[in-house]
Amino acid sequence: MNTEMMNAVKAADDKAQYDIRAKRLLAQKSILAHILVKTVDEFKGMKPEEVVTYIEGDPKVGIVPVEPGLTNAEQIEDSGQRIKGLNTEDAEINEGMIRFDIIFYVRMKDGLSQIIINIEAQKDEPVAYKILNRAIFYVSRLVSSQKERDFVNSNYDDIKQVFSIWICMNMDCNSMSHIHLTKDEMLEPYEWKGNIDLLNIVLIGIRNDLPEHNEKYELHRLIGALLSDELQEKEKLSIIENEYSIPLSDDLRKDVSIMCNLSQGIVDKTKAEIIVNMYKKGFTPDQIADAVEVSLAEVEANIKKKEASVYNK
């Protein structure tokens, strides 16, 4: 395998690892609690540390299939009894399978009812499809997959409320939208029985630059800091601990550290590719250094590395 191909494979692997760490960071219960406080009416006004106790079990990260017929596949204990739970059995079988980024149950304050939360992280707003269309599909799957898992037969009153929360980075403005069912009277009004609040989509847009730490943009600053590819590790940990009073567990520290290292590695590889491509097109080392905003020595080192790899083929 030549040097260019090896670098491409390594960059792809780093990107995949970066995405996994980003999801794991968001799936920390202390982080999820901050998201719930800002997006779910049941928990608005509560302290995030109080909401943590309502999150049940360990959030499933990247292992629950979205595909119909798989999300709620029955699981059987050794005793032969059926057990309820989100299906994770196919996580390693089909690499092309679409899976929820993060999914978990939350107990409501009454101690009895539950809701299902799905969180999806996007680098930016997709261009291949309209994000709202995908969110509608996901929230619909969160409902339909409950049959024979959370409710059986025709017991539709047992359907749990669901939230699909989409976080989009690199947006033009900090935004947050709640999309849900509404009722328009077309003739005489009538009070139809049922729960109109079962389906909920929340779209959160986050700019690159961090907003000030205030109540309005509190969640945006936290997530922006967590997923930033520009902040250093110490800066991220300082914001998490000092501004949001989030305990710095070993897992959280580890994920932040690895994310920062991977991010820097991806940036370095991208710069190296730009330098080599500009050199191929006839730009001088001085022009490249000025355009890419790196030192002349770094430009020359990358050019020499490229020429050496070509020579050694």
Image (cartoon, rainbow, N blue to C red):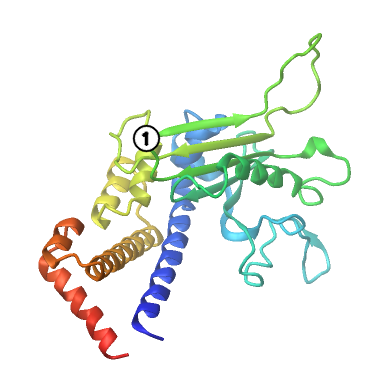
Q: Residue at x 54, y 47 (%)?
A: 119
Is residue 276 positioned above or below 158 on the image?
A: below
Q: Position of residue 147 (x, y in %)?
A: 80, 48
Up-down relation of residue 106 to residue 173 (above or below): below
Residue 286 or residue 66, whichever sits in front: 286
Q: Single out the residue that lies furthest toward the top.
A: 188
Label 1 Cα crowd, 10 Å radius (few <14 / some 14-19 / many 20+):
some
Q: Quadrant of the N terminus?
A: bottom left
Residue 271 in percent (x, y) is at 26, 64
Left or right, residue 91 beside residue 166: right
Where's residue 288, x and y in %? 17, 62
Q: Residue furthest right?
A: 153
Q: Is residue 301 toward the left or the right of residue 34 in the image? A: left
- Reply above or below: 289 against 177: below
Viewer-proximal residue among 124 and 160: 124
- The residue positioned 57% from the left and 42% from the top of the image is 130
x 88%, y 45%: residue: 153
Percent x, y of residue 256? 35, 58
* Residue 50 showing in the rendered view: no
Under tag 1, what secondary structure? helix
Say left or right for 310 vs 103: left
Residue that protrudes farthest toward the front in the picture: 282
Give the number of callouts: 1
Q: Which residue is mark 1?
A: 218
Q: Amino acid at mark 1?
A: Glu
Q: Is residue 264 above or below residue 109?
A: below
Is residue 290 at least partly visible in the picture? yes
Quadrant housing the C terminus: bottom left
Looking at the image, the residue that sits furthest to the bottom is 312
Task: Identify which residue is drawn at 44% across, 47% down.
Answer: 124
Q: Quadrant of residue 291?
A: bottom left
